[in-house]
């Protein structure tokens, strides 16, 4: 999830898929912008976003079962993997 839903969300999507693969997990991963996150989160278990956008995402999503995970570096597959593993256990 990123503000506009173009570049950085595509990078995060790709690296989330890589992290999940390294963990031996499969998931449907999609990229979204802030305007579409509520719809995208309707059946999501996890929402990955930047720390800078996390509060906006929480407001946009409202009540949801999805856990919002803040990622510091969209390029760090290790960080993404650690956070996903902690969440999905």
Image: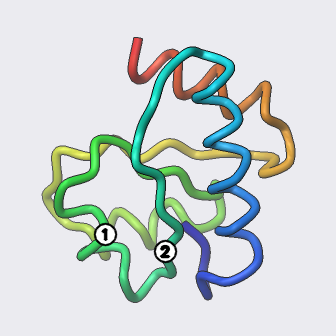
Residue 26 locus on image (x, y percent): 45, 31
Question: Nearer the N terminus, badge 2 or badge 1?
Answer: 2
Front residue of 60/25: it is: 25
Front residue of 17/9: it is: 17
- The residue sitting at 70% across, 36% down in the picture is 18
- Other-residue count near label 1 (Cα within 10 Å), few / some / many at <14 / 14–19 / ≥20: some
Residue 18 lies, with reference to residue 30, above or below; the image says above
- The residue sitting at 54% across, 66% down in the picture is 1
- The residue sitting at 46% across, 64% down in the picture is 55
Residue 52 image label: none
Front residue of 9/64: it is: 9
Residue 40 image label: 1
Residue 60 locus on image (x, y percent): 31, 76
Count how many numbered circles sit on residues in the image.
2
Residue 50 lies, with reference to residue 65, above or below; the image says below
Residue that numbered label 2 is attached to: 32
Whether residues under marks 2 and 1 lie with C-beta atoms below 8 angstroms apart, the answer is yes
- In the displayed structure, does residue 60 sit left or right of residue 50? left
- Other-residue count near label 2 (Cα within 10 Å), few / some / many at <14 / 14–19 / ≥20: many
- The residue sitting at 57% across, 57% down in the picture is 49
Q: Quadrant of the C terminus?
A: top left
């Amino acid at each position: 999830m990123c503000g506009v839903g173009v570049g950085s969300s595509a990078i995060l999507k790709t690296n989330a898929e890589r992290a999940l693969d390294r963990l031996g997990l499969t998931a449907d991963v999609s990229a979204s912008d802030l305007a579409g996150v509520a719809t995208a989160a309707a059946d999501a278990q996890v929402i990955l976003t930047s720390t800078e956008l996390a509060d906006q995402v929480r407001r946009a999503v409202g009540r949801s079962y999805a856990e919002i995970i803040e990622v510091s570096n969209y390029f760090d597959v290790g960080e993404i993997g650690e956070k996903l593993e902690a969440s999905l256990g």
